[in-house]
Amino acid sequence: MADEKVDGLACKGEETVVDFDKLHDLFVYDESGSSLRFSDIYKHQKTIIVFTRHFHCFVCKDYIEDLGTVPPEYLQAADVGIVAIGPAPFKFIKSFKEETGFNYPLYTDPERKVYKALNLQEKMVHGDGKNNKHVKQNLFMGSLKSTWNALKVGEFEGNIKQQGGGFILGPGDVVHFAHIDANSLDHTPINDLLEKAGVAPVSFPKDKRD
C-alpha cells in the first residue's frame, strides 16, 4: 500500500492511523528540560522514531543500545534521522543515554501526551522473547534487575504499564510505517525499520546481515 495523506490523517497498512492534527501542538523535552514541538522532529526529514517503555525496562535498553549502533553514514546516505522518545521525566535522559551508549536524539514525554495521541497501549503485557532480535539478557534475571534498579532510584522512570512503538514519519505529515507494540517484547526489528526507511541494514548477533 502506498503512503497516504488525507484530511490531516496519514496511514500505512492496517496496523494504526496517525492523526497529525493531534500531534502538531504536542511537545517533548530534551535533557535540559527545553521543549520541542513533536512535529518538528520529522518536519524536514524522514525520521525513524522509537517510543520506549519506562527507562528501567531492560528490553528497551537492549533495543536502544542496538539502535544506537546504526552508523551515521548509513543514515546520511539515505537522508534519514533516528530519534527515541521515552515516557520518563527529562532528568533521566542523561543516565539512560550513558547506560545504552545511544548518541542520537533522545527526548521524553513524561505526561505521555504523544503516546496517547498515537494510541500506544497502556497495559501490563509481557511477550515471548523467542523472536525478539535484540534482547541480550535472560528475561527472568533482566526483570529482577529492572525492579531492583527502580527500587534503588525510588521510581520506575516512567509508567510501568506503558508500551512503546516504532514509526517512520516525514518529511512533513507522511507515514511510511507505523507499529504499536502489543507487549514489552513486540519491538519492530531494527533492520525492518531501516529497510522500510531506505537505510542499509546492520548485522546484529541475532539478526545477521551481509
Image (cartoon, grey):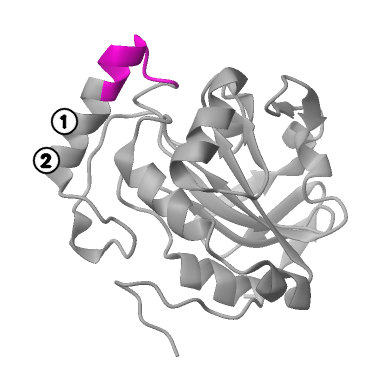
Label at residue 140: 2
Residue 137 x/y as whole percent: 21, 50
Residue 101 x/y as whole percent: 51, 48
Q: Which residue is found at the position 47% from the left and 65% from the top?
A: 190
Label 1: element kind: helix
Question: Mark 2–mark 1 contact, CB under 8 Å?
Answer: yes
Above or below, comparing residue 130 to residue 186 in the picture = below
Question: Which of the 4 image quarters holds residue 19?
Answer: top right
Q: Which residue is found at the position 37% from the left and 12% from the top?
A: 155
Q: Which residue is mark 1?
A: 144
Q: Which residue is found at the position 35% from the left and 75% from the top?
A: 207
Residue 44 x/y as whole percent: 88, 56
Q: Is residue 169 left or right of residue 84?
A: right
Q: Is residue 55 left or right of residue 148?
A: right
Q: Residues within 10 Å of mark 1 (few under 14, many from 20)?
A: few
Label at residue 85: none
Task: Single out the residue that lies furthest toward the left.
Answer: 140
Label 1 sits on what residue type? Leu
The quadrant the C terminus occupies is bottom left
Residue 194 x/y as whole percent: 57, 71
Q: Which residues are magenta?
A: 149-157
> Is residue 157 visible to the viewer in this orientation of the structure?
yes
Label 2: element kind: helix
> Is residue 119 visible to the viewer in this orientation of the structure?
no
Return the residue nearer the eye: 207 or 6: 207
Question: Which of the 4 image quarters holds residue 48?
Answer: bottom right
Q: Residues within 10 Å of mark 2 (few under 14, many from 20)?
A: few
Label 2 sits on what residue type? Phe
- Residue 57 among those drawn in magenta: no
